[in-house]
Image (cartoon, helix red, strand yellow):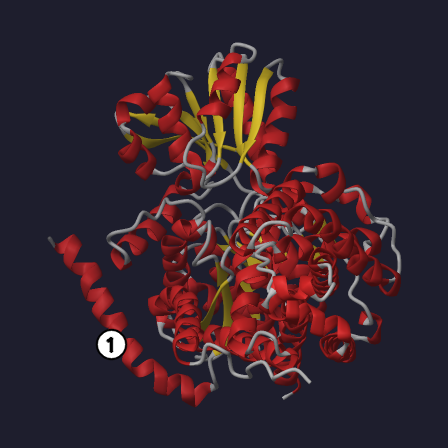
Amino acid sequence: MTALRLPRRAALAAGAASLFAPSLARAQGEAIRIGVILSATGGLAAFVPPIRAGIVLAFEEMNAAGGVLNGRRLQMVEADDQTNPQAGVTVATRLVQAENVSAIIGPMASGITIAVANAVTVPAGVPIVSPSATAPAVSQINDNDTVFRTAVPDGLQGQVLARLVREAGIERVAIMAINNDYGRGLAGSFTAAFQARGGTVAGAQNYEENRPSYRAELQTLARTGNPQALLLIGYPASGGNTILRNSIENGFFQRYIGTDGMRDQGVIDQIGARALEGMFGTGPGTAAAPERREAYAAAFRRANPQMDPGAAFVAQAYDAAYVIGLAIQAAGSAERAAIRANLRTVANGPGEVVGPGEFARARDLIARGAKVNYEGASGPVEFNATGDAQGRIEHWAVRGGRLTSVAQLSE
Amino acid sequence: MEAALLYLATMLTLAGVYACLALGLNLQWGLTGLMNFGGLGFLAVGAYTAALLTAPESAQQSAAHGGGFGWPWWVAWPLAALAGALLALPVGAAALRLRADYLAIATIGIGEILRLVVRNEDWLTGGPLGVPGIPRPLESLGEPAGQFAFLALVLLVAAGLYAMAEATARSPFGRTLRAIREDEEAAKAVGKNPGAFRLAAFVLGAGCMGLAGAMLAGFFKFMGPDALDPVTATFLVWVMLIAGGSGNNRGAILGAVAVWAIWAASDFLAAQLPGEAATRAAYVRLFLIGLALQLILLHRPQGLLGERPGR
């Protein structure tokens, strides 16, 4: 009981502190505005609630710890890109030009990130940190070092997945991939790595979203080249569940392999645990030390009892907010260029390691002139030359009807 | 202050592009009574024509698409309009024989076919990765100046299309179109060939949409299949035209600006809402546009500015 009571007391204290925070903030200068572009409507909408909760949690923790730059609060300015690049560019323009944000978290989709970067944020010099843009093309934007991501690019996921599939004794796979930059990119990197390991892609189909049935495509795949398993690259709500259902009902495939998009307990609950038993796949992993991960997960569950801290890209979103907050503190300024210049300083080693929920300690370290190295909920968050985090890939599997994390892999 | 002006310029630029789309649709629907629900397709053809012609050669390595010729925009934009018109020629020849509601279905189909072609013909369009790095005209003027110059360019094009549309509406050609819209048999009886006139209006309107697509591609500096959304590319334009007043070119422009202002303002207002409500408000925006259309249709079916009687 005491273990339960303590956080509650801490939460009360934090709540009481936040009562005083507004007046403090006014005394110390106005809030620093951080843009958050998520796909609240459209194809990716199902992912948004936990991702948003992760970002809110990070901002609340930093504000409860006293904010940045002598008590200035971090304020979220939200926008919905409708999972559409044009809408993304429009709302990004609003954030950059009318709302005058210092930095942006998001957008979620790779195509939207590329469009927003090219049209708005690169010319304006606004740093953006996407929690979930995984297409390799994001690294190739001519971005003046303004585009970062806490998500691990799909190239790595394809390689890890190819190895896992071969190790599972599967030689011939059929691929159903969603027909967009994510599906095509991941299918491509998987195919290359799988063939290099002596596997054969028996057949591949790019499917359109939101069709009532995928029987025809599945039948073609099942009859071509005698595949042993189906690799499904997609999202549950826009076709992934339908594909699994069609395939199971008609007995097209017996084994299923998934990727980050299908890594969702809801899939198992809706399709049925028996048919999916033994399904495995990859997802955004965590290289976080267990205690850091646990600190984040506990805080997340306290704030959002209904949501899963392990849901796709939530830890990445949390980390994106944290590195921006730390970069502002380290820069001593909320100027866009200063944040951009300090993102690597606070995220990469060497330096005193700080983790989730340790904003106050990080701020004290920075105040003493020490260099901090943020190791987050999703991994060590080390940005390389193109602004990509060097993370881990999770190996997950369906065991006893539960989506279970098997291992965290780096290659 | 300057930032707010820049934002206003962005919104006006998009309103200008929508005005061109609405003017094109007005030629087809307002003047001639052709129910074209395939605006997306003509916009896409224009957008991709301009995108592939103007994208720099160096982009060819990073994204595999068939373009990257690095042509100047003032060559590519007229060609984009031409491409929209050229697409309309066979489509119109085949589909315009259908009566109003069947034509609507046929054009929806064409719009969807083009969307799928764009998504799947990687060798030409870059598939789902689209065409990145499209240069924006006049951006060499620097950050604030370039954006205002582009706005001026878009407004100039919109003004030019307006002048053309007005001249068309007043000309004997325009009167014939209205006559065909009102009573096809009567127009035939006085020796007009309705098929040819309808095709001409359809092609002309499609050219406007192609040009609008080219401006959109230049403004976003990126064109991909996800950007071709029937809601924003086809149906929003219909709402604009009907709200502004179909048959009236000024109404088309007013509708485009007014509806775009509501669209943009609702995004702005939604963002001021606290927390979770802000994300939910995104759905309310779509509802608001639909509600506005219902109210206009019920209480002012002729739109804000109705069609003026012909002279």
Question: How far from the left and from the top, in percent, is residue A384?
Answer: 65, 48
Chain letter for mark 1: A
Q: What kind of residue is marked 1?
A: Ala
Question: How far from the left and from the top, in percent, is residue A8?
Answer: 19, 62
Quadrant position of residue B190: bottom right
Q: How many marks?
A: 1
> Would you place residue B293 above or below residue A374 in this image?
below
A286, B221: nearer the viewer: B221
What residue do we see at 81% from left, 68% from top? Answer: B137
| Furthest residue toward front | B189
Question: How far from the left and from the top, in percent, is residue B212?
Answer: 71, 65
> Would you place residue A400 above or below residue B136 in this image?
above
What residue do we see at 72% from left, 68% from top? Answer: A123
Q: At numbered mark 1, what does the secondary structure look like: helix, strand or loop?
A: helix
B206, A328: nearer the viewer: B206
A378, B231: nearer the viewer: B231
Question: How far from the left and from the top, in percent, is residue B8?
Answer: 62, 81
What residue do we see at 22% from left, 60% from top? Answer: A7
Quadrant position of residue B285: bottom left
> Would you place residue A297 above or below residue A88 in this image?
above
Q: Is residue A101 visible?
A: no
| Furthest residue toward left | A1
With A295 as the anchor, is B253 left or right in this view?
right
Q: Is residue A260 visible?
A: yes
Read off the residue under disc 1: A16
What residue do we see at 62% from left, 25% from top? Answer: A191
> Would you place residue B138 above or below residue B220 in this image?
below
With A242 as the anchor, is A209 left or right in this view?
right
Q: Characterize the local packing of mark 1: few (<14), some (14-19) or many (20 or more) Cα atoms within 10 angstroms.
A: few
Which quarter of the rendering shows the C terminus of chain A?
top right
